[in-house]
Amino acid sequence: MRAVVYHQHGSTDELVVEDLPEPQLRPGDALIEVGAASLNGFDPMMLAGSTSLETPLPMVPCGDFAGRILAFAEGSDPGPWKEGDRVCPHPFVLGEGMTGETRVGAACERVRIPIPNLIAIPDGVSDVQAASLPIAYGTAYRMMITRGEVRAGETVLVLGATGGVGTGCVQLAKSLGATVIATGSSEAKLDALRDLGADHVIDNKQDDWVRAVHEIAGKPRMLGSGGVDVVINYIGGETWAESLRCLRSDGRMLTCGATIGFNPPTDIRYIWTYEQRIIGSNGWTPDEQRKLLERVAAGDLAPVIDSVVSLEGARSAMDALIDRRVFGKVVIEPALGPRSGSLCK
């Protein structure tokens, strides 16, 4: 089968499209024909070898995918499932870890996944839409709704709002009735955030974004109003202490990562003075993923798709992700493009 592969860590030059052996099913596995798979921010990190995770090589990127069931491992009990069912599996596998990180990913034509990981795709939801949801939107859903309990009438600041998780946070916050302040790094992205529903946008490269937040939401006061109710900060680094300056008394900082630094300087004075709360969120559950699929099916949520590319387009797509030229999700459709192995374009 055709797959996007890297045989060693490095730059996107390591990505090639080549033929790999068919997945070897284990007892309890289903074989999925991949209709669509999507890239996430962790994929370039895995390619570069910049994490502490041990990556099996050769490696195929992409944890998110959707498609249809082709077969089941011999002797396995498929339960309610049958061949031909459309599914968007939860990508974390007990004993193996995350698809695309510590187990082979889904930027290929066929994938094996344990039957308990299968999640049905509702009618009216495309493979491209479904494959955009799990990691980015699942993370946003758990952070915003399950853990953060964002409510109507609150003001939510989303930092770095233009990627998969960020656009998901903007959409979910608006659906909950919150006022959204979103930051981005270019005028085109700020326009896209406005179109997505953000009430206020801030250019984090050109503006003093903390001052800009104060102008919009007011400066926090110890016994008064001012500041935002919720800050979404999965960036870390120097933005961490700055975020505390934007948060109102009894406000909540929600975090699910630290893309530019996990050990930032902070200022504990803001935390005790304003009785702020720091709430962590890690991953998402299969039930939360089902709820997202139901929202898309009902027309209450439309995942933001930056582009759809072939396997041969994976290299340029990864470059765009690294260079932060992506707004929303990049999706790979294995059925697109030439059938012969070649370097990714």
Image: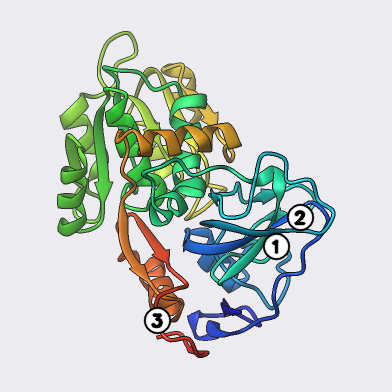
Mark 1: secondary structure = loop
Q: Earlier in the sequence, mark 3 or mark 2?
A: 2
In front: 8, or 119? 119
Q: Residue at x 57, y 72 (%)?
A: 47
Q: Amino acid at mark 1?
A: Arg
Q: CA distance from mark 3 to mark 2?
A: 31 Å
Given contact means CB atoms under 8 Å apart, are the residues at marks 1 and 2 in contact? yes
**Residue labelled with disc 2:** 96
**Residue labelled with disc 3:** 337
Left or right of residue 307, residue 85 in this image: right
Q: Position of residue 4 (x, y in %)?
A: 55, 77
Q: Is residue 73 visible?
A: yes
Left or right of residue 316, residue 279 in this image: right
**Residue labelled with disc 1:** 103
In front: 90, or 112? 112
In front: 180, or 278? 180
Q: Residue at x 21, y 55 (%)?
A: 189
Q: Residues within 10 Å of mark 2 (few under 14, many from 20)?
A: few
Tell me the mark number nearer the camera, choosing from 3 and 2. Answer: 3
Q: Amino acid at mark 2?
A: Glu
